[in-house]
Amino acid sequence: MDVNNVNLEVVSGMASQFPTTGLVEVAFAGKSNVGKSSLLNTMVNRKALARTSSQPGKTQTINFYNVEDKLYLVDLPGYGYAKVSMEERKRWGEFIETYLHERIQLKLIVLLIDIRHSPGELDQMMYKWMKHHGFPMIVVATKMDKLKRSQVGKHIAMVRKGLGMNAEDICIPFSSITKQGRDEIWEILDQTLSL
Ligand SMILES: Nc1nc2c(ncn2[C@@H]2O[C@H](COP(=O)(O)OP(=O)(O)O)[C@@H](O)[C@H]2O)c(=O)[nH]1
Ligand SMILES: [Mg+2]
């Protein structure tokens, strides 16, 4: 898709603030600092629309980016940030769960995993939980520019195995630096959403 118009339409801290336009949605989930905001920016050809941070754990809101009045890209708060209290963690879990369960317009979840490391326990939990509930999802393995090209295949296999992905499940290597993987992800969105 050609993206010219995109804007952060809704920043929500509670479900009553979610948009009511009915546009289809694609949500980005993953550990804090895995590269969700960077992926979002790359998808819409913007440098700093979604704010990226080298300090993890900042975003606790669910942010809806309106793309061409055709869909929302939805930036979910990252999980696994050590310096949050149990109380905050619980609130985070409930908020995300509410979002995932309530949105009938949610057509695809993109789960981000850092290509350099084996998926952690929280990644595995997230993946299993989403699979269990039957959400359509793909995995994007971020920061592939940090690996030698010759290492990419091995690391994708590691991510797939770590999450217990089936052969037909999709896992795309991606870099927000080189933009590798961007077109492939858009192709999947175009197909899934019939844009
Ligand atoms: N080398 C490299 N760094 C990345 C990539 N994606 C994100 N980063 C960096 O990782 C940090 C966290 O990225 P961010 O998008 O804010 O992660 P978020 O917390 O998941 O939204 C930032 O310093 C980004 O510049 C990537 O593909 N390659
Ligand atoms: Mg972010």
Image: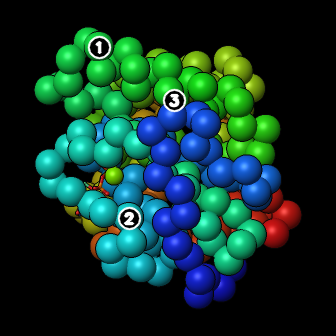
Which secondary structure lies at badge 3?
helix
Q: On the picture, is 139 further left or further right than 82? A: right
Q: Is residue 170 above or below residue 67?
A: above
Check disc 3 and report the residue beneath it: 96
Residue 116 shows which numbered tag?
Answer: none
Going by the image, does 75 lie left or right of 90?
right
Q: Quadrant of the C terminus?
A: bottom right
Q: Is residue 92 above or below residue 190?
A: above
Query: Residue at coordinates 32% horizontally, 19% vertically from top-left?
Result: 89
Counting every numbered tag in the picture gives 3
From the image, which quarter does the N terminus lie in?
bottom right
Labelled disc at residue 50: 2
Image quadrant where residue 191 sits: bottom right
Under mark 1, the amino acid is Glu
Mark closer to the observer (1, 2): 1
Decide which of 76, 166 is in the foreground and name it.
76
Residue type at tag 3: Ile
| Residue at image location 64% in from the left, 60% down from the top | 72
Question: Can you identify the residue that label 1 sits on?
Answer: 87
Q: Amino acid at mark 2?
A: Ala
In depth, the one of 30 and 174 nearer the eye is 30
Q: Earlier in the sequence, mark 3 or mark 1?
A: 1
- For marks 1 and 2, the one nearer the N-term is 2
Quarter containing ligand 1?
A: bottom left
Which color scheme did the rendering employ for the protein? Answer: rainbow
Of 63 and 133, the residue lying toward us: 63
Label 2 beta carbon within 8 A of ligand 2: yes
